[in-house]
Amino acid sequence: MSEEDSILDNIEIHKNFAIISINPKLYPLSVIYSAAYWLLDRVHVIIDGDPETEILVEIRPKDKKVDLKEIGYEFNDELINYSVYTVQATRNKRLREMIVEKALMGNIGQQPSQTQQYINPQTEKCDCPTPQGKQESSTWKPREQTLQDEELQKLRERIIPTNNSDLFKGVGDIDEDGIANVQNYRHKKDEFLND
Amino acid sequence: MDAIKVEKNRCVLKLNNDFYPERIIKEGIDTFQNKERISFSEGRIIIEKNKNNNPEKVAYEFCDYLLSLIQGGSRWH
């Protein structure tokens, strides 16, 4: 090769390109593809050769600033990097499959929750037992059940929480103004600080 | 390596079928045909000179694209 500048291990460096030779018995083709793909942002890549004996990878820089020698060594590093990744991925394959299986079975294979058990799949109505006894699916529909006064009161308390001042009403030695200020502090922090 | 041959008004690309399957080459040509005058016959890819583009440069970009298609099809990461 007349225009060949130098040979560094498995890298032939020419004027405008370099050829890297790879032993396919050491590195599988998938690893070579991955390493070549890694360099695509800096060099053009063409793969040639014999897949049984010697694979040749031609790299041609996209930018003149690219150092072919450096890229060649980086390619060798990436071959090792992807080989290790492939070996580890093969070793851990069964473990990864088991984790995914377990995660999927958590949703698919588990028993229905207590609430789901009461839903009649044919009518999609709730057969949930109540203090008054089991509701009739044919007559009862969600949101149609009337609430007792006591239950309504509990619901209101949830929506409108009891004020701190009401909570301590009638209890001695309680600074009711202070409690009110603390409540206001949540909503009017700036005014409270200025005072 | 003589995968790319530059002629007067065109560039002829002969890729090794062991590394670039025909299915991938055809897929690449389908994509490049929108902008370039590119054809595939008897295992050779011919890129005709265009008004704006250098066919040799298009050939190298085509090879890069094929590599990305190979990687995209066989691996998920």
Image: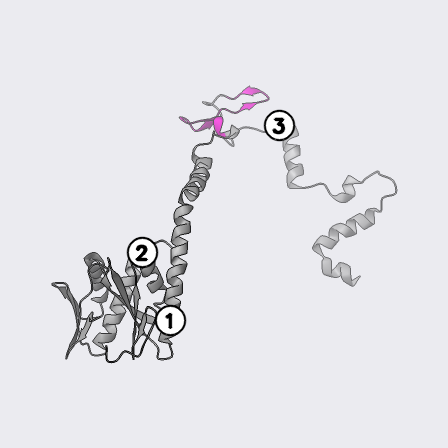
B75, above or below A121, in the image: below
Of all chains, the one bearing label 1 is A
Same subunit: marks 2 and 3: yes
Single out the mark in the foreground, 3 or 1. 1
Label ID, residue A71 = 1
Q: Mark 2 points at which residue?
A: A28
Residue type at mark 1?
Ile
Residue farthest toward the top in the current orientation of the protein: A133
Of all chains, the one bearing label 3 is A
Which residue is more in the foreground, A24 or A124?
A24
Image coordinates of residue B55 in percent, x first then y, are 21, 75
Q: In which quarter of the image is the C terminus of chain A?
A: bottom right
State whether residue A141 appears in this view: no
Mark 1 lies on a secondary structure that is helix
Of all chains, the one bearing label 2 is A
Image coordinates of residue B22 in percent, x first then y, are 19, 58
Q: Is residue B1 left or right of residue A115?
A: left
Label ID, residue A148 = 3
Image coordinates of residue A189 in percent, x first then y, are 72, 58
Which residue is found at the position 63% from the left and 30% from the top?
A151
Q: What stretch is highlighted in magenta?
A: A116-135
> CB under 8 Å between callouts 2 and 3?
no
Which residue is found at the position 37% from the left and 74% from the top?
A69
A121, above or below B66, in the image: above
Q: In this view, does A2 lie to the left or right of A119?
A: left
